[in-house]
C-alpha cells in the first residue's frame, strides 16, 4: 500500500531533483524548495497533486506530484512520479559565460584584477 504523504526533503531526493538527501534537506532549510507556493521545511508533508518548486543545481524546476515515494528510485521510474512544468533552459547564447584570458597572456596586472573584481561585483 502506498503512503498518502511523505516528507518534502525525502520526496525531492527520491525523484532525483537533488543528488543526495542531505542536499535536499539543506535546500529545504535554505528556502530553495516551495510546496504550493509556500516555503517548505524538510519535514513538511507532500501529497499527490501538490506543486513543488525547487531551485536545483541544474536550474529551477517546477513539478506537480503524481505519486508519493519513500525511497529513491531509478530515473525512468522517477519521471513517472511527477508532471514537469519547468521553464525551458535559456538558449546557449544567453547563458552567462565567464571571460577567459588568452592562453599564454601571463598573470593579470593589478589593474586587470581590479576590473575582474568589479565585473564580478566584489
Image (tube, rainbow, N blue to C red):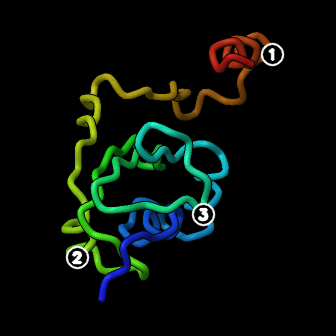
For label 2, the residue is 77
- The residue lying at 37 percent from left, 62 percent from top is 47
The percent coordinates of residue 117 (x first, y second) are 72, 18
Q: Nearer the viewer, residue 105 or 118?
A: 118
Measure the C-alpha gap from mark 2 to mark 1: 54 Å
Q: Quadrant of the C terminus?
A: top right
Instruction: Say above or below: 116 vs 7.
Output: above
For label 1, the residue is 110
Q: Decide if residue 22 is on the left or right side of residue 66.
A: right
| Secondary element at tag 3 | loop
| Secondary element at tag 1 | helix
What residue occupies the far right of the structure in this picture? 110
Mark 3 or mark 1, earlier in chain? 3
Q: Nearer the viewer, mark 2 or mark 1?
A: 2
Instruction: Say above or below: 17 vs 113.
Output: below
Q: Decide if residue 101 is on the left or right side of residue 122.
A: left
Instruction: Say above or below: 15 vs 95.
Output: below
Q: Decide if residue 42 is on the left or right side of residue 118.
A: left
Amino acid at each position: 500500500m502506498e503512503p498518502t504523504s511523505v516528507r518534502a526533503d525525502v520526496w525531492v531526493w527520491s525523484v532525483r531533483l537533488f543528488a543526495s538527501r542531505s542536499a535536499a534537506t539543506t535546500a529545504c532549510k535554505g528556502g530553495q524548495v516551495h510546496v504550493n507556493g509556500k516555503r517548505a521545511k524538510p519535514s513538511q508533508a507532500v501529497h499527490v497533486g501538490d506543486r513543488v518548486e525547487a531551485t536545483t543545481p541544474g536550474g529551477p524546476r517546477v513539478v506537480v506530484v503524481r505519486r508519493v515515494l519513500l525511497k529513491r528510485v531509478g530515473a525512468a521510474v522517477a519521471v513517472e512520479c511527477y508532471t514537469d512544468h519547468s521553464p525551458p533552459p535559456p538558449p546557449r547564447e544567453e547563458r552567462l559565460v565567464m571571460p577567459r584570458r588568452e592562453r599564454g597572456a601571463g598573470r593579470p596586472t593589478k589593474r586587470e584584477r581590479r576590473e575582474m573584481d568589479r565585473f564580478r561585483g566584489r
